[in-house]
């Protein structure tokens, strides 16, 4: 019986020591330097950017959604065009969104603009990133949603509701693995 307890203790120690390595295997952080660079430029948490990327495209730079979103951070071409105008980029074309650095730069800028609009509230920012800033403003103005984490079930779009939950859960995991 004593040998069994010793074996269990050893296995537990091995599991704990390998948990971070295993976790990082399932939650990798590709494009780390680019993510960290643009997180500093736009004063964002790099692990939140990583959580958005993992949720949006699972780090697949050539990802395209059925609705037409492109790249790592799944930016719609019209949104990309608008972001490019805000950044002073004159030669924007949607294909540029397939470039990981350009996509992370634009997606990070867009997240930062949402943080400014929604006064730093990450719940509202994530909901707006997925559901559109206009919809979030309308829901808040019409009292369809309070904007609070404990009222996510009030979000009228099921996809946005699930998106916010998934990014927040992924962010917590990244925070545990990479802080």
Image (spheres, helix red, strand yellow):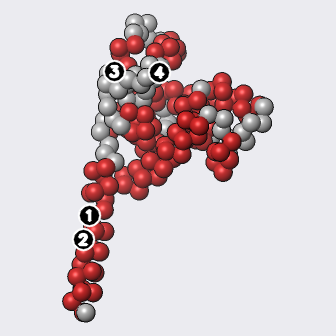
Q: Which mark is residue 85?
A: none
User: At 68% from the left edge and 47% from the top edge, which residue is drawn?
Assistant: 151
**Can you name the residue that lies furthest to the top here?**
91
Mark 2–mark 4 distance (CA, rounded to whole Å):
45 Å
Give the mark, 4 or 1, whose residue is nearer the N terminus: 1
Mark 4–mark 3 distance (CA, rounded to whole Å):
16 Å
Q: Which mark is residue 98?
A: 3
Mark 3–mark 2 distance (CA, rounded to whole Å):
40 Å
Residue for badge 2: 14
- The C terminus appears in which quarter of the rendering? bottom left
Which dot, 4 or 1, sits closer to the camera? 4
Looking at the picture, how far across and down is residue 91, in whole percent? Answer: 40, 6
- The N terminus appears in which quarter of the rendering? bottom left
Mark 1–mark 2 distance (CA, rounded to whole Å):
6 Å
User: At 62% from the left edge and 34% from the top edge, which residue is drawn?
Assistant: 157
Q: Is residue 124 left or right of residue 90?
A: right
Residue for badge 4: 67
- Nearest the viewer among 67 and 36 is 67
Looking at the picture, how far across and down is residue 87, in whole percent? Answer: 48, 16
User: On screen, 177 above or below 57?
Assistant: below
Q: For the image shown, how many numbered marks are present on the structure?
A: 4
Question: Does residue 162 appear in this view?
Answer: yes
Q: Which mark is residue 18?
A: 1
User: On screen, 82 above or below 22?
Assistant: above
Secondary structure of the residue carrying tag 3 is: helix
- Label 2 Cα crowd, 10 Å radius (few <14 / some 14-19 / many 20+): few
Looking at the picture, how far across and down is residue 65, in whole percent? Answer: 42, 25
User: At 78% from the left edge and 36% from the top edge, which residue is drawn?
Assistant: 143
């Amino acid at each position: 019986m004593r040998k069994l307890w010793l074996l269990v203790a050893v296995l537990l120690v091995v599991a704990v020591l390998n948990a971070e390595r295993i976790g990082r295997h399932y939650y990798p952080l590709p494009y780390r330097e680019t993510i960290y660079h643009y997180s500093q430029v736009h004063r964002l948490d790099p692990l939140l950017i990583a959580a958005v990327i993992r949720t949006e495209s699972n780090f697949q730079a050539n990802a395209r959604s059925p609705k037409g979103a492109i790249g790592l951070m799944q930016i719609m071409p019209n949104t990309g065009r608008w972001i490019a105008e805000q950044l002073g980029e004159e030669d924007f074309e949607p294909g540029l969104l397939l470039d990981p650095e350009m996509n992370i730069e634009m997606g990070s800028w867009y997240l930062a603009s949402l943080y400014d609009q929604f006064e730093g509230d990450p719940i509202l920012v994530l909901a707006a990133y997925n559901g559109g800033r206009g919809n979030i403003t309308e829901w808040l103005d019409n009292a369809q949603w309070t904007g609070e984490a404990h009222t996510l079930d009030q979000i009228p779009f099921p996809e946005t509701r699930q998106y916010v939950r998934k990014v927040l859960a992924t962010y917590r995991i990244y925070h545990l693995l990479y802080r």
